[in-house]
Image (cartoon, grey):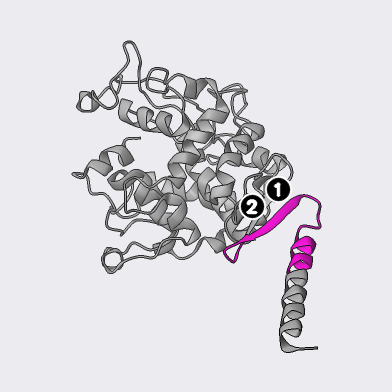
Amino acid sequence: MDAKRVSAFAVIAILSLSLLILSAEADDGKTDVKKVKGKKLCRKKEWECNTWSEFCCNETISDVFQVYQFENLFSKRNTPVAHAVGFWDYQSFIIAANIYEPLGFGTTGGKQMQMKEIAAFLGHVGSKTTCGYGVATGGPLAWGLCYNREMSPSQSYCDDFYKFEFPCAPGAEYYGRGALPIYWNYNYGAAGKALKVDLLNHPEYIEQNATLAFQAAIWKWITPVKKGQPSAHDVFVGNWKPTKNDTLAKRVPGFGATMNLLYGDLTCGKGDIDPMNNIVSHYLYYLDLLGVGREQAGPHDVLTCAEQGLFNPPDSPAAVASSSS
């Protein structure tokens, strides 16, 4: 047998072995697998994560986070004194999350990182929608998703500075709505543009549809505030590498940086203030309830943004959208 024929057989053998490996990886009957330019991509055969993506090779959110866990996190949301009884549910969250799972939301890394990101995202949600207080039944951290809208708006949140790009619709009020509440016409406009829903003319859609409310919140979580910056998702799961300037400003990957990006000077760079501590407390509480454990949250400088310099100082355009959305 000549060298060329041996070489051809070797190539065929390698290709056959590769196909067998791929078949074995997909042998659960639920996942299709292929390689594109050396990268493994997967697509689930069921409704969740059914787009080709490297992240869909991992477990899906519904694999690691189930109905009973959602109910544990938000156990008081449907009590009679809550303000959004019957609105929020697990199904709405999972349907909303499905859009972003192929992009890595809740599907990045191993199971522990997946659970940590779910706890982190929902920790923000819980703290921003809570009606809990110190002596509330079940404790102050059990009352997330109590609201789906701002109860007593002090204004209509229409900013004419954006009248050409995101003009305020007649009669529309852009007060806080949603899982990570949206405020102001320009933030409704940007979210609506991304979600392909006319939120500028119909901001009320967010308080009428829980799936849409969760979609808007997850979009905010995975989308950078401005070009060249990481998203909250990026800084949490490790996609972001700090620059020298970030290091000098004490900005490090972790939960603290998510607050820095989402809320700016309302929460960060002011020491251990209550608004920051409330968000952190929800995250730690959720880590415990999900069985991950708060010890996995990291040291104080990773967990908080108490001493961090701001990604977007108050006088920057991005800070307007970040801190008031």
Q: Position of residue 31 (x, y in %)?
A: 74, 52
Q: Amino acid at mark 1?
A: Lys
Residue at 57 percent across and 55 percent down: it is: 116
Q: Position of residue 230 (x, y in %)?
A: 38, 54
Residue at 59 percent across and 29 percent down: it is: 88
First in residue order: circle 1 vs circle 2:
1
Q: Position of residue 227 (x, y in %)?
A: 32, 49
Please say whether residue 139 is one of the residues in the magenta stretch: no
Q: Which mark is residue 44?
A: 1
Residue 62 vs 248, above or below: the answer is: above
Question: In this image, 1 relative to 66: left or right?
Answer: right
Label 1 neighbourhood size at 10 Å, few (<14), some (14-19), many (20+)? many
Q: Are marks 1 and 2 in contact (CB under 8 Å)?
A: yes
Local SS, label 2: helix
Local SS, label 1: strand
The quarter holding residue 90 reads top right
Q: Residue tagged by mark 2? A: 56
Residue 208 vs 38, above or below: the answer is: above
Residue 226 vs 116, above or below: the answer is: above
Q: Amino acid at mark 2?
A: Cys
Nearer-the-camera pick, 180 or 18: 18
Query: In this picture, which residue range is highlighted in magenta?
Result: 18-39
The quarter of the image holding the N terminus is bottom right
Residue 181 vs 207, above or below: the answer is: below
